[in-house]
Every structure is written in C-alpha cells, then in structure tokens.
Amino acid sequence: MREVYEKTGRPIRYTGQNFQYYKNLMEIAARKENDDELYNLMKGEKTYSENFTNLQKSARERLQVGLQELIFSSECTNIGHQHMELADGLAMWKYLYECFEGTANAQTKAMTKHQLYAQLAAARCKQNGN
C-alpha cells in the first residue's frame, strides 16, 4: 500500500500487499464515516434475513453499496477486476479477506511465507551488516 487519501483517511491504490494494514485502514474509514452498521457488516457482526421488510432490505442495500464504494475507491484497477462480478459489497470484502489473508488459498499463504523468508535472507546477507 502506497497512499492514504488525507481528507477521508481511506487507502487508495491498494495493490494486494500487506493486507492487515489495508484491512485496518478500511475498518477505520468505515468508522470515520460514522457508520457503525457498515463497520459491523465488515466485521461479520451484522447479518440479514431474507424475511426482512422492504425498509430493512433498502437499508441493507445502502450498506452494500457503501461497502462496494469503499472497496472500489481504495484499490488499484488490477485488484478491482478480480471481484467485479461479485454480487455485493460483503461478497467483495470476503473475497479480499480470503484471497489476501490466505485463509482460502494455500498457494497465497505459501507465497507469503516464501516472500518473508526471502526478505529475511536478504536482510542477513547485506555486505555492511546494516
């Protein structure tokens, strides 16, 4: 992650690196918008039923669109293309979480470990010992 938009605190141009940092910034951005419902939706603490009234369904749709906007406005185009067809904001957030946390993708988890080991080895092998 390279940048954070100063006016809103939202991350911008997320490239898939350091998901923990990105996830925390996104949760902060949701709370900054004084939208506890959106934050609870992201945390998985808010669930919905198919038996909701039209008013409740409308509120759910508003949250889903808000989450989609938050996600799309914070990513680079390459990451956004990976989940464009998903149904709603919560599905997009779950996709990002599973993909970049490595919870659903063993290959991502292995690559993350490999990258960390490579960085550690490179740090140990510097000539001046710095």
Image (cartoon, rainbow, N blue to C red):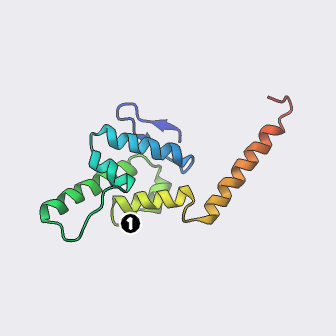
- Left or right position of 74 against 62: right
Q: Which residue shows up at 35% across the image and 35% down it?
A: 8
Q: Which residue shows up at 33% across the image and 62% down it?
A: 88
The image position of residue 94, as x and y in percent, is 43, 60
Q: Which residue shows up at 40% across the image and 31% down it?
A: 6
Q: In which quarter of the image is residue 51?
A: bottom left
Q: Is residue 40 visible to the viewer in this orientation of the structure? A: yes
Q: Which of 13 and 48 is in front in this view?
A: 48
Q: Name the residue under label 1.
A: 86
Q: Quadrant of residue 35?
A: top left
Q: Of all residues shown, which one is farthest toward the right?
A: 127
Query: Mark 1 Cα within 10 Å, few/some/many (few <14, many 20+)?
Result: few
The image position of residue 36, as x and y in percent, is 28, 45
Q: Which of 66 and 27 is in front in this view?
A: 27
In the rendered image, which quarter contains the C terminus?
Answer: top right
Relative to 30, residue 61 above or below: below
The image position of residue 39, as x and y in percent, is 33, 48
Q: Nearer the viewer, residue 72 or 102?
A: 102
- Left or right position of 4 against 126: left
Residue type (three-letter) at the residue carrying disc 1: Leu
